[in-house]
Amino acid sequence: MTLDENGVRCAEMVLARYFTEIGKRQWRPVKEVMCFAKIYSPQTRKAEIKEARKRLGVESQSFEGGYCRRWADERSPEIVWAEKSRAMFGGNT
């Protein structure tokens, strides 16, 4: 399966936006993260979201209740979201 680079970029924007809204250092259930991604980018496949997570350095860890994720990049998710938005759409986003 070949990844769609635009799909990966879109997933990067959505993940950065998600962690902007909930707080970058909070562990969040994988199901919640995936639900957010599928709502805001329904055409994006799981493999593209997985690749975006790797590129962004989003951590994943197992807890008693299941797997959770959190933002691990030193840059804030707000900055990453703005950069990715500009790169995809242009302008002063």
Image (cartoon, rainbow, N blue to C red):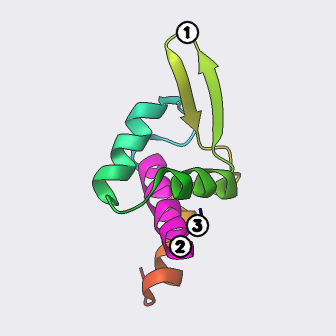
**As drawn, 54 above or below 65:** below
Extreme residue in the bottom direction: 91
Against 30, is 9 above or below? below
Q: Residues within 10 Å of mark 2 (few under 14, many from 20)?
A: many
Callout 3 environment at 10 Å: few (<14), some (14 to 19), or many (20+)? few
Contact (Cβ within 8 Å) of mark 2 with mark 1? no
Q: Is residue 70 left or right of residue 73?
A: left
Q: Amino acid at mark 2?
A: Lys
Mark found first going from the N terminus, 2 or 1: 1
Residues in magenta, as a range: 2-20
Q: Are marks 3 and 1 in contact (CB under 8 Å)?
A: no
Secondary structure at numbered mark 3: loop
The residue under the point 46% across, 67% down is 10
Q: Amino acid at mark 3?
A: Leu
Disc 2 versus disc 3: nearer the observer: 3
**Per the image, is 33 magenta?**
no
Secondary element type, mark 1: loop
Q: Which mark is residue 82?
A: none
For mark 3, what is the residue?
3
Sequence-wise, the earlier of marks 3 and 1 is 3
Residue 84 shows which numbered tag? 2
Question: Which three-letter amino acid code belongs to the residue tagged 1?
Answer: Glu
Mark count: 3
Q: Against 86, is 7 above or below?
A: above
Q: Are marks 2 and 3 in contact (CB under 8 Å)?
A: no
Give the alpha-carbon distance from disc 2 to disc 1, as whole Å: 34 Å
Q: In whole angstroms, how far apart are the C-alphas of marks 3 and 1? A: 32 Å
Identify residue for label 1.
64
